[in-house]
Amino acid sequence: MTLAEADLSTLVDEWLDWDQAAERLGVTPAKVRTMIRDHELAAAVPAPGAGPQVPADLIGDDGLPVKGLGGLLTLLHDGRYDDREIIAWLFTDADLPGRPIDALRENRGAEVKRRAQAMAL
């Protein structure tokens, strides 16, 4: 199965709509849209019929996007991955000890970025 075919509803435990994401970030829903467009956050439609949403784990406990996320998103977008594929990769337990999102949240982003660079080539 490819990243584009992954079932995001089973990979991601908690999703936030624009309003919920804005509340956690302390910004407006319009700013959330801008953050997604500027690759500071990622969003996808988790299930048919749902609107685009942001995985809750992309926002840290400090109310900011997880450290290193923006650079990682830009790197993968430059490699022609879309938000849906990136979210699937971040939340899939691969070769890292745990999922890439867990490594980012635990400030172990160097290995995640190295693997993302290899993918983007």
Image (cartoon, rainbow, N blue to C red):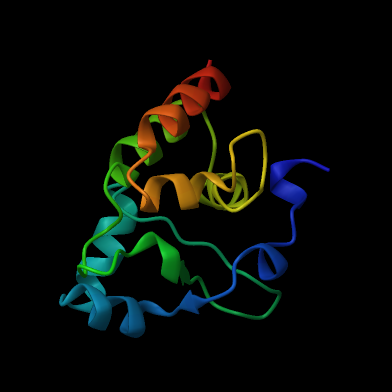
Vertical position of residue 17 compared to residue 67: above or below = below
Rendered location of residue 21, percent (x, y): 33, 76
**73 relative to 4 in the view: left or right:** left
Q: In the rendered image, which quarter contains the N terminus? A: top right
Vertical position of residue 64 compared to residue 92: above or below = below
What's the residue at 48%, 72% (across, down)?
53
What's the residue at 43%, 65% (across, down)?
57
Q: Quadrant of residue 54?
A: bottom left
In the image, farthest residue toward the right: 1
Q: Quadrant of residue 16?
A: bottom left
**37 relative to 78 in the view: left or right:** left
Rendered location of residue 65, percent (x, y): 27, 58
Residue sitting nearer the eye, 76 or 92: 92
Residue sitting nearer the eye, 92 or 72: 92
Tally the marks: 0
**117 relative to 99 in the view: left or right:** left
Rendered location of residue 70, percent (x, y): 29, 43
**43 relative to 3 in the view: left or right:** left
Rendered location of residue 110, percent (x, y): 37, 29
What's the residue at 59%, 73% (across, down)?
13
Vertical position of residue 66 compared to residue 44: above or below = above
